[in-house]
Amino acid sequence: MHDLSGDHGVRLPDFIIGGAPKCGTTSLHFILGQHPDIGLPDNEIAFFDADDPIVHPDFLFVEDGRLEWFDVRETAPQSLEWYASRFAPFRDAQAVGEDSTTYLFSAAAPERIHSLLPEVKMIFLLRDPVQRAYSQYWHLIRTARLACSFEEALTEHSSIILGSTYAPHLRRYLASFGRDQVKVQVFEDFTRDKQGSIDDVTDYLGVPRMTLSDAQTWFNRSTYPQKPRLHRMANRIGRRIVAGRYRNHMGKRSGLRQKIGNKLEYNWFHRVNPRLLTAVRPPPMRADTAAYLTQHLSARNAGLSDLLGRNLSRVWKGFEG
């Protein structure tokens, strides 16, 4: 990739929160975003893996019969300029970061990140892989990207299993950056002791510690469909409406069509969804599904406990990796 680090006035990230999704990364972003010496864009950037259809199926779409995608190769300097522009407001911050939770699982991301940002510090949060998969499913339901049961989703959407496969992807980052540039936290530790976890992160980033208040540690609590089957039926319509939101990534699409799509999407999320999402917890996972995932995801994460230097079976129920 073209090196922007020497360009006058360009500020690029000192750290990246690279995943995993549904493991507390939004809460970590929310807290670090309140630190006076840290600059963080509001939304996920999704730059280094935007052209990866495995981790970003929403970024590969058909427009007027033509396949469209995002090009982040070195032959697309305008994409690099777009990336750098995300951090322009934070030129004077002591530490600048970004949060893109799919970087962990992209085969291309580690090399691309290292090429542009060889000294960047990576941060990853990991969660009980079975619970993470279930949480991702309900996130996809809430955002109208699925209209099927959890069991059907497991057979049709490989990203749910991929998102709970940590060990091989962590090894890639450790090989690219070394242990001094890779910080891994466990979600269950983070939720139990946010202050200690944040102290660990700020020390790692080399910025002053921050004392957390209740307001700083509270973030949006997830809501769930009161009637899951009805919500899935509604999503058969909703997923066509919300698909357009991903087509304007990196300024890809604009004009009247995008404006109409944005209006429909806004109405879906602010008028339709609130009437459907009134439960505070999801229905329990089927026991046979949980048993299958525990066995399967333990195998896919073989060696993870050794990689992190702790016995994860004491934290994650049934885990044997």
Image: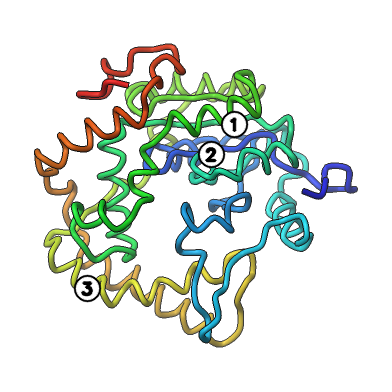
Q: Secondary structure at mark 2?
A: loop
Cα separation, mark 3 vs mark 1, equals 38 Å
Can you say whether 201 is above or below 62 in the image?
Answer: above
Per the image, label 3 sits on a secondary structure element best described as: helix
Q: Is residue 292 placed above or below 78 in the rendered structure?
A: above
Q: Which mark is residue 122?
A: 1
Residue at the image position 52 percent from the left and 20 percent from the top = 199
Q: Nearer the viewer, residue 262 or 306?
A: 306
Q: Earlier in the sequence, mark 3 or mark 2?
A: 2
Q: Residue at x 22, y 30 (%)?
A: 295
63 relative to 285 in the view: left or right: right
Residue under circle 2? 18
Q: Are marks 1 and 2 in contact (CB under 8 Å)?
A: yes
Q: Residues within 10 Å of mark 2 (few under 14, many from 20)?
A: many
The amino acid sitting under disc 1 is Met
Q: Which mark is residue 158?
A: none
Q: Where does the image place residue 124, in percent across and percent down from the top left?
A: 49, 32
Q: CA distance from mark 1 to mark 2?
A: 7 Å
Left or right relative to 116: residue 169: left
Residue 122: % across, % down: 59, 31
SS assignment at label 1: strand
Label at residue 234: 3
